[in-house]
Amino acid sequence: MVSRQGMWRVLTVLLLATLVLSGCQGHDSLNVLDPSGSAGQKQLDLIKWSFFLMCGVFAVVITIFIYVLIRFRKRKGIDVMPEQTHGSNTLEIIWTVIPIILLAVLAVPTVTYTFDLADMPREEDSIKVKVTGYQYWWEFQYEGMNIKTAQELHIPVGKKVHLEIHGKDVLHSFWVPALGGKTDVIPGRVNTMWLDAKKPGVYQGKCAELCGAGHALMDFKVIAEEQADFDKWVAQMQKPAVAQTASQKEGEKIFMQNCLGCHAGTNPRIIGPDLNKFGTRTTIAGILPHDEQNLKKWLKDPTSVKPGTLMPKIDYLEPKEMDALVDYLMNRK
Ligand code: CUA
């Protein structure tokens, strides 16, 4: 028998858990229960299907349980043992066959959807993007468009996006909860998945595999736009960014001398993101709002922003040089 005190303890823990877990809601769009893509919708259908099926099983079992408790309880004056059914073939067959039927009912949509989701979209109605996971950032390379970017994946609404997923160092996992899917990123192996967005919006993405100190901050965004806006973005990304003012030209020189070793988009042994169109991004390092102050903070002490990052401290520049570098980067549009 649970004491009254014990019961209160359990209730307190449940209440606190409810409060804490309710904090998980509301982070942009990290919600599998409110999908905005067809892959996410299929996965939610499966979740609902198995959840309600299990609710049915629970209801039947609990009803029989309560019925037996009441019907066969010990009553005053009646002291007969109910009929024992141990070893009944009929019962054994019933409770073997029912789970088989339930599993079959679950298996049909699961297998169908698994094949649907593994079926890559046809080239003519999709775009193809090579995704590469690094500790702790994401690179996106658009096939046939000559676009390479990081942390922000722009996609056109209503079009399937074929993702070819590569890993550069350790295991990561590519996950956009609201659009669906979670695919392992494995060095030396290429995994594929597709997703689409049904309406414009910014969908939060996460690395879903513990990959080191900066794992929790390995965020990215999927930015879904109407086709016309996407085309505009593509055109802008394909235009070379040219330093305009004297300060930006000075910044470009500093960039060449200090940053290009790791951030050269053409270097196959690249260890930092291509910063060619850095000015068009909405975040710094995938997590900080995109402004000059945050960029300086990141440059001067990257590990204070993202623990474990390979980005070295750029804390040796004169304030004027730092201003020029930041001016240059923020205007690479
Ligand atoms: Cu990459 Cu966790």
Image (spheres, rainbow, N blue to C red):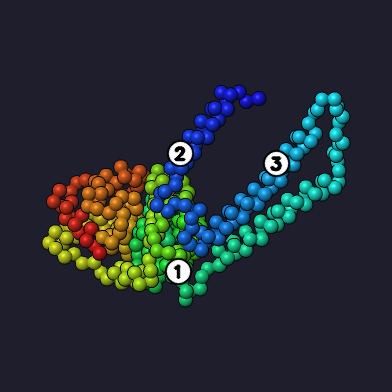
Check disc 1 and report the residue beneath it.
Answer: 158
Q: In which image quadrant can residue 45 be found?
A: bottom right
Identify the disc placed on residue 20. 2
N-terminal-most mark, 2 or 1: 2
Q: Circle 2: is it few (<14), some (14-19), or many (20+) Cα within 10 Å?
A: few
Q: In the rendering, at what x and y percent does residue 301 appear?
A: 27, 44
Q: In the rendering, at what x and y percent does residue 64 appear?
A: 74, 42
Nearest the camera: 100 or 328?
100
Number of marks in the rendered image? 3
Q: In the rendering, at what x and y percent does residue 25 appear?
A: 44, 47
Going by the numbered disc 3, the residue's amino acid type is Ile
Q: Residue at x 85, y 39 (%)?
A: 85
Q: In which image quadrant can residue 49 be found?
A: bottom right
Alpha-carbon span between mark 1 and mark 3: 45 Å
SS assignment at label 3: helix
Q: Residue at x 25, y 46 (%)?
A: 297
Q: Is residue 135 visible?
A: no
Q: Quadrant of the N terminus?
A: top right
SS assignment at label 2: helix
Nearest the camera: 49 or 118?
49
Please say if 227 is above or below 23.
below
Q: Circle 3: is it few (<14), some (14-19), or many (20+) Cα within 10 Å?
A: few
Q: Residue at x 53, y 60 (%)?
A: 41
Going by the numbered disc 2, the residue's amino acid type is Val
